[in-house]
Image (cartoon, helix red, strand yellow):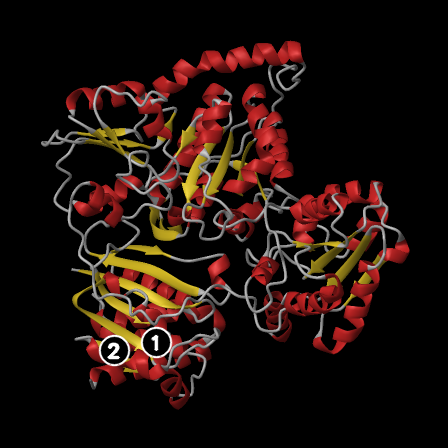
Amino acid sequence: MEQLVLLGAEAIAQGALDSGISGVYAYPGTPSTEITEYIQNNRYALEQGIHSQWSANEKTAMETALGMSYAGKRSIVCMKHVGLNVAADNFINSAITGVNGGLIVVVADDPSMHSSQNEQDSRFYADFALLPVLEPTTQQEAYDLVFAGFELSEKFSLPVMMRITTRLSHSRASVKRRVVKEQNGLKMPSDPRQFVLLPAIAKKRYRNLLGLQPALIQASEDSMFNQDYPGSDNSVGIIACGIAYNYVAENFPNGIPYPVLKISQYPAPVEKIRKLTQTCKQILVLEEGYPLIERSLTGILNYSPVPVHGRLDGTIPRDGELNPDIVATALGMETINGPAVPEFLANRPPSMCKGCGHIDTYNALLDAIKPFGTGRTFSDIGCYTLGALPPLEAINSCVDMGASVTMAKGAADAGLLPAVAVIGDSTFTHSGMTGLLDAINENSPITVIISDNETTGMTGGQTSAAHGRLESICLGLGVPPEHLKLIIPLKKNHDENVQVIAGELNHQGISVIISRRECIQTAIKHKKVQNS
Amino acid sequence: MKTDIILAGVGGQGILTIAAAIGFATLYEHKFSKQSEVHGMSQRGGAVLSHLRISDKPIASDLIPLGKADLILSVEPMEALRYLPFLTKNGWVVTNSVPFENISDYPSIGKIREEYDKLPNAVWIDAEQIAKECQSPKASNIVMLGAASEYLCFSFDSLKVGVEQVFKRKGTEVVEANILALEAGRKFSSKI
């Protein structure tokens, strides 16, 4: 079969196409974005009419995918780890409803927070929801596990989570394809009440989910992706989850001397773990993310038949991504460093592009807010979050999608006046609109600046859900027309923009200022397309 | 045979293009490869790093262990120094000498240069000047790839195939300009 060189994210996308999905649903977020983009740019997907348009947020994506599953077809839904917080309501409940057509929830975690505000471990969500998780070790396994995931999903009528991390998602290796499976036909659920979670039905469905757990554990015991490898030296037994296995293998090019259990399917295979603890003098648990297996092994009493090492006892750092050197150190092996980094080296954090409209928006805001004092600007998730760094230092918060509007409202409720929210256009439609409605309903004295670059910039310029319709959305929600302003963030408009913002800061009620100029990156791309 | 490469630079300098060209060359020679890239936030003018591993045998880790990189290839002189702990004994550091100064506390170029003088195997090359001289001003990243080509575990011809593959969609003129840049880079470092 055909060999392709693919990112881990792309391997999942190709696996999904080859397993006969009828749709992918997603909101962009690093490190998950490339999955959906791969399908959007795939000719076969286009010919087959496979759905791939971006959703407004992860919750709408997850729900739509569940709807496709209701109709009997296969789908995947993709998001970054914090996106699952947004989709959590549907995700948890989808375990109770179960699925009809196969459904894989792909969640890309970001340990070490390369592009995120936390490093939460999505496996805990699946554990909480009582759903199986697949955690690939390689790009090939990512591809193969999509096939296995759909079989598992349709066998147990449950959604299945596939959990990857930044490193696998953004690393390229060769992948061998399989025979392409046709899409499922339209098929109604056999039980018409399966998806009706009224308490009486939900209780039954929940018991059904609980009843499936032993079979899910058995599926993990039997899974070819949970491999136990024998070893000659039983002084340590290693449990390595997902890509952690690669870091063990890297340290032993001539074969790993210790018994190893590689876990790529959860719930954890209990018997396989028991066997390892019975044959080895101590256990080292290597997991990317939080100590899920490790904590289950020792429990709150911190007791186990053999000593367990990992993130909890300090053998592995408690936070951050794993690498071959951390694993070598944990196994008592020496690491060799090259020359030291010279002390005079300066950090080079990311920054907004030269000529970016967000910069002009912030410059105008900073001048307008001067008379009131700083410390009152709540912001959000996007390129404009970089406005927190010098030289601008223009914002005072960045918590989660949409929190700028609502935190500004809360601060205004507390008496911090005026309070300002700065939010991007895509973030606004993702989760800002509902918060704005709260503020409108109480005519809260806040100024919401929608820094509209007409795209989802930080993740590479994806379509913004309400492009061209922000004014009508704001008016429809109830922003008074006289307090809905449009400014163009350019240097030459600076004085005028400062005046507009100052005017609204002085208004004792809700105002929205749309500051609109196309993202400099997408503008360059559009120009190139025009010229060619 | 294996080559472990740390690719360094600043977001937007064309590191992923270098990585893609090497990736195609590796595929052309039927070698194993793993290539860890940086996408997302750091691409906005921040320090970026890519781990590129090529071997005759299957590769386990997507990340290169400390002290194991055979080559640090950097399109910016300060950025290469950030990853020195990855360099193996007698490994090579090949860098563009033109600084990318988008931060206020950028150290003096003299200080940076001194660090290269301490290294046993370093190539310091004005890639932008060479790119201009061969009429391919946009191809300084490919000049760098050419300058590092001697330290890779595959043939120069395969690397040419890789560069062709990367640019073929942009037309023959762009391909030719980049091949010229690749050759000019190689010529420069072979004189050292």
Please name the residue shown 72% across and 57% down the image. Answer: A450
- A79 over A91 or under it: above or below: below
Quarter that holds the N terminus of chain A: top left
Please name the residue shown 47% across and 44% down the image. Answer: A13
- From the top left corner, tell me how far across and down residue B36 is, in percent: 35, 55
Q: Residues within 10 Å of mark 1 (few under 14, many from 20)?
A: many
Quarter that holds the C terminus of chain A: bottom right
Asked if residue A375 can be seen in this view, the reply is yes
- At label 1, the amino acid type is Pro
Query: Are the residues at dot 1 and dot 2 in contact (C-beta closer than 8 Å)?
Result: yes
- From the top left corner, tell me how far across and down residue A232 is, in percent: 9, 31
- From the top left corner, tell me how far across and down residue A202 is, in percent: 61, 14
Judging from the image, mark 1 belongs to the subunit labelled: B
Residue A90: image quadrant is: top right
Judged from the image, the secondary structure of the residue bearing numbered disc 1 is helix
- A32 over A520 or under it: above or below: above
On residue B77, which mark appears? 1
Residue bearing mark 2: B116
- At label 2, the amino acid type is Tyr
Extreme residue in the left direction: A232
Judging from the image, mark 2 belongs to the subunit labelled: B
Residues behind callouts 1 and 2 on a single chain: yes
Q: Residues within 10 Å of mark 2 (few under 14, many from 20)?
A: some
Please name the residue shown 84% across and 57% down the image. Answer: A484
On residue A138, which mark appears? none
Q: Nearer the viewer, residue B9 or A26?
A: B9
Residue B184: image quadrant is: bottom left
